[in-house]
Amino acid sequence: MSHRTVIQDHNSGPKSIDRFPNQTNKSMQNNFLSRIALAFVALLWAFSAVQAAKPMTTIAQLTADWQRAKEYTKEYLDVMPEDGVNYKPTPEIRSFAEQMLHLAAANYNFGALASGKPNPFQGKKLEEMSELKTKAALTKAVMDSYDFMLDAVKGLTDAQLGESVKMGQREMTKEVVLAKAFEHQTHHRGQCTIYIRMKGVKPPNEKLF
């Protein structure tokens, strides 16, 4: 239903007058306020997206942490006697060497994914390589994997840590990939503590810093 009235002006013809001008103004105000609210919500969403992608750590911190992890793992390799390298607490689990080689393989895999560098052991199973199961060869193989990871980390910028990559069916930032890698090596090094204990050797002290 129209709320406009037509009146006759003898000079210029019929004119239309809005009988409810306040209602029209209110509608325009509501429309204007709705647009402002939508723009504000969009701005908040964009800001949240930027904040979510912003890395929580830095390359400098990651480099320090991975260097510390390398040194700590070296202490584990150093204290295990030669006759304990292929020791298994029970037959169905990995040996000490296989634990360490599994750790090393993951360092290569995670480092390659985060950095885009080719994995030098792609398609190979380090755990099954008998030539790496002496103390000297094992130590070199594991330390080389940490060097690969450190090079991978140092080759990134802080901003690149927020970039997304796919790991299998999962999508995550490079920062998360490196966090998973750090968690993985910590887990498997920790498992080796009992191997060392059962060989009658005191494991290395905790190395938080």
Image (tube, rainbow, N blue to C red):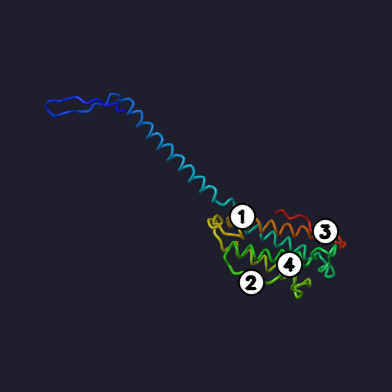
Residue 79 occupies quadrant: bottom right
The answer to which of marks 2 and 1 sits earlier in the sequence is: 2
Q: State how far apart marks 4 and 1 are (Cα).
A: 22 Å
Q: Which residue is mark 3?
A: 194
Q: Secondary structure at mark 1?
A: helix
Q: Amino acid at mark 4?
A: Leu
What's the mark number on residue 97? Answer: none
Count residues near mark 1 (Cα–Cα under 10 Å), then give few for <14, some for 14-19, many for 20+. some
Q: State how far apart marks 3 and 4 are (Cα).
A: 17 Å
The answer to which of marks 3 and 2 sits earlier in the sequence is: 2
Q: Secondary structure at mark 2?
A: loop
Q: State how far apart marks 2 and 1 are (Cα).
A: 22 Å
Q: Position of residue 176 (x, y in %)?
A: 61, 55
Q: Position of residue 152 (x, y in %)?
A: 60, 64
Name which residue lies at 79% across and 60% down: 192
Q: Secondary structure at mark 3?
A: helix
Q: Which residue is mark 1?
A: 176
- Between 150 and 4, the one lying in front of the other is 4
Q: State how far apart marks 3 and 2 are (Cα).
A: 31 Å
Q: State how far apart marks 3 and 1 are (Cα).
A: 29 Å
Count residues near mark 4 (Cα–Cα under 10 Å), then give few for <14, some for 14-19, many for 20+. many
Residue 126 occupies quadrant: bottom right
**Tags 4 and 1 touching, CB below 8 Å:** no
Q: Which residue is mark 2?
A: 120
Q: State how far apart marks 2 and 4 are (Cα).
A: 14 Å
